[in-house]
Amino acid sequence: MAVTVRDPIHRSILVEPWAVPLLDAPVVQRLRRILQLGNAHLVYPGARHSRFEHSLGAHHMAGRLAAALGLDEHEARTVRAAALLHDVGHGPFSHAFEELVKEEGRRHEEASVDLIAWGPLGDLLRQSGLDPTAVADAVAGRGPLAPLVSGSLDADRTDYLLRDAHYTGVPTSVDPDRLLEVVERDAKHGVVLRSSGLTAAEALLTTRYLMYPSVYLHRTVRSCESMLLAAIRDLIQQGGATLRELERETDDVVLARLRAAKGPASELATRLDERRLHKHALEIRPSGNAEWTRLSRDPAARRKLGAQLADAARLPHHMVLLDVPQPPKFRELALQVRQPDGSLIPLPQASRLVAVLQEARDDHWRAWVFAPRAERERVAAVARRELGDLAAGAVAPASGSASAAAPFA
């Protein structure tokens, strides 16, 4: 029996009978208890949407995209199944926890592929007439159907961009209906855009560009994530859990384990519960500096430098946190645009606006030193001294910062 789900983004999502058992599978239902944006709700109270909602939305968009590209029924089901299941391997707190997984040289997609190809999900897919390997390949970015699930213009990113903007209150001009009207299938590139759809693509990229400073790289969101990761690392170091154990848990279970722990893990969890967040002591624009780029890719070096700053400030290591996220990435820049003569050119070459956004994508990239409010000025002075040339152009909050009057800053 088919199920219709009401959704604030797509209004109605039809889950056909073959997909209902997949939707009801425990590994998919688990996603209800994993927030899409981690702790971003401490900045944007509405940002409590889950990976489950997003997976349903991606499933819906995959069906629409498959229809727009003229896929046959079996291909369409494979793509829709892959979109529904693409996040089943996600750890708690979504991309925040992903940073810990990456430190072991893994990605959540690998866990998703294993869950899809083996065990109960594989059995359910076979019962629906689908090949688990083909579904897993689409999630992993392999094969002819992968661009619809994990490409430059896919069901996954279209849904999460619309959904994240909606729940954080960020205005967007993304028009998915128009995008579906101007895409076509290409043997080499998977999904390409007709030149008549440039305006729709520009709206998509502009929204993505603005979501970085507004949400994804918002300094308070990054402070929350830094505190959470420091707490989880401390729990693991205490022997209270292993990363593999925590990876299959949900947000609420991990928070409960942090609260029940001792030392920094419990203290940081309490600070998050009470929203006594670390404030930025120093904000740095790292663009153009090779050392900051290296630090963004080397978590061990980043933690070592953060510990050095804490030691210099004579504070416990969990009280001074260095955050150097990787620069923004726009996979949409690889999108090919079909010209009237039939040739294909990259999106930045077809659109001056997109070319400018490509040049400006690092403008919102920042590195931060976070510390408790009472210590921020002292930590700022220490960080400037210890970082030396790396702190060139750094901005510290003014004494008596207005953030005290702006609780969500």
Image: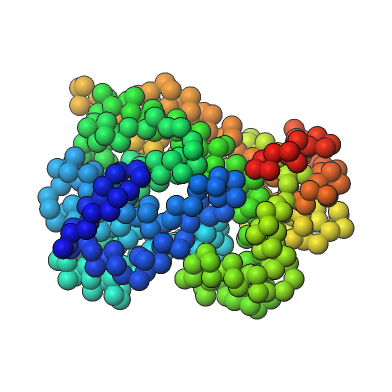
Answer left or right for 177 relative to 400.
left
Camera-side residue of 95 and 139: 95
- The reply to whether residue 300 is visible in this rendering is no
Answer left or right for 371 relative to 331.
right
Residue sitting at x 67%, y 74%: 261
In the image, residue 257 sits, relative to residue 156, either above or below, namely below
**Residue 201 in the image: x percent, y percent?**
35, 30
For the view shown, which residue lies furthest in the left direction? Answer: 72
In the image, residue 338 sits, relative to residue 104, either above or below, namely above
For the view shown, which residue lies furthest in the bottom direction? Answer: 239
Residue 64, quarter of picture: top left
- The reply to whether residue 92 is visible in this rendering is yes
**Residue 161 in the image: x percent, y percent?**
41, 42
Camera-side residue of 275 and 348: 275
Camera-side residue of 146 and 22: 22
Looking at the image, what colour scheme do you see?
Answer: rainbow
Answer left or right for 318 relative to 359.
right
**Residue 192 in the image: x percent, y percent?**
27, 36
Residue 264, quarter of picture: bottom right
Residue sitting at x 74%, y 71%: 263
**Residue 132 in the image: x percent, y percent?**
24, 66
User: Could you tell me which quadrant the N terminus lies in?
Assistant: bottom left
In the image, residue 5 sits, relative to residue 220, either above or below, namely below
Residue 83, quarter of picture: bottom left
Residue sitting at x 52%, y 75%: 245
Residue sitting at x 34%, y 36%: 335
Answer left or right for 9 relative to 324.
left
User: Could you tell me which quadrant the C terminus lies in?
Assistant: top right
Q: How many labels, in total?
A: 0
